[in-house]
Image (tube, rainbow, N blue to C red):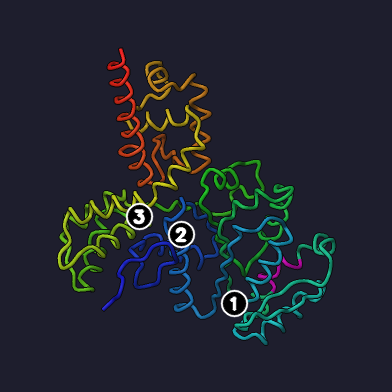
Amino acid sequence: MRSVPFTYGRVTASDDFTNRSGEIAQLKRNFLAGVNTILISPRRWGKTSLLRRVSEELTREQKDICICHIDIFDLRNEHQFYVALANGVLQATSSRWEEFVKDAKQFLAALVPTITFSPDMQTGVSFGVGWEEIERNPEEILDLAERVAERKKIRMIVCIDEFQSLASFANPLAFQKKLRARWQNHKHVTYCLYGSKRHMLLEVFTDSSMPFYKFGELLYLKKIGTEEWIPFIRRRFNETGKEISEDDARLIAQLAENHPYYVQQLAQQSWFRTGRKCNREIILSAREDIVSQLGLLFANITERFSATQMGLLRAIIAGEKQLSAQQTLLQYRLGTSANVVRVKRVLIESEVLDDSGGELTFLDPMFRYWLEFILFNTNKHNNRQSAENKTKDV
């Protein structure tokens, strides 16, 4: 019997993974065919878990495939990137620390590799030469995966998470040109580049003036559908001796707007509160507790918003479709139509809103709920009380 049947906030294990059969099949086809892939979705939609699942299946089915995973979110410059890439490739292709050491000396001899060991015997590599030497010969590292794969007669998939972080490096365009110039010639390595900032990734991969234009196939990760969540939620409850009806499982998915992280969290919190059989009241109570726990975080977020940004959020929640219409501009104090365009862009870039097919939606369904039913309702209540007090004073 499972102890806790739902997983969120970390990479999902195989038996916790939910559907994504279409995306799994497409990624496997691309990787086997040597097609570079750009995977795009908002944060906490399960990109990393999806790629780990694909890695497990591919390496089990294809003995000559090796998959390397690198997260560059915290990297701030080219030097850190080169070190992370070298370590990722060597660790993925070495089964023992002795092999790691041997490969580092063989493939990176010109850069004078220095091998370090952590207490748990994990190996790492740094370089004895100065940054200037690496900068003059970046191909030593940029071609490392290709040279290792060719020598070991394997096919390699290099998956790089938060690829848009390269934009924070000095001279990002020049650096991207270096990467593209080397990687486009690789025959034994396929690249999967992914991240959560869609507007930045789209600029990198769809702007014809950018070095990575048409580098690979774009794959947009969608939410898992409600009808796919229902059997998953019910099975998890059943596996732990508890029950939930089809309608209540559907309610969990709908309240979380099929957001993978929040579906799992709401399902878990509902499961915790369930004795034998879950019901609607339990689910609604769990949702209120989640929103309450996040309230301070949401309040801190809104403190950074301007009055116009808050006005635009109010308008969207109210269901306004013509945000630049004169009546909407006046009612929500949005200023001019040009100002609406600017504010909308800022909220999209800060990952508050998403513009999909011309429709603005909130990326965080719990934040939307908090705004509509707690912050804005509280403000309405306070404004009403203030008006009543003024009337009494008169």
Q: Which residue is mark 1?
A: 154
- Image depth: mark 1 or mark 2 in front: 2
The x and y percentages for residue 194 are 53, 56
Q: Vertically, is 257 above or below 342?
A: below
Front residue of 267/67: it is 267
Front residue of 307/235: it is 307
Q: Which residue is mark 2?
A: 47
In terms of sequence position, does the residue under pointer 2 or pointer 3 come before the other? 2
Q: Which residue is mark 3?
A: 262
The x and y percentages for residue 237 are 22, 68
Q: Quadrant of residue 160?
A: bottom right
Under circle 3, the secondary element is: helix
Quadrant in which the N terminus is drawn: bottom left
Image position of 113 (left or right of 1): right
Q: Which residues are the magenta region?
A: 140-147
- Image depth: mark 3 or mark 1 in front: 3
Alpha-carbon span between mark 3 and mark 1: 39 Å
Image position of 23 (left or right of 155): left
In terms of sequence position, does the residue under pointer 1 or pointer 2 come before the other? 2
The x and y percentages for residue 112 are 81, 75
Q: Residues within 10 Å of mark 3 (few under 14, many from 20)?
A: many
Q: Is residue 330 magenta?
A: no
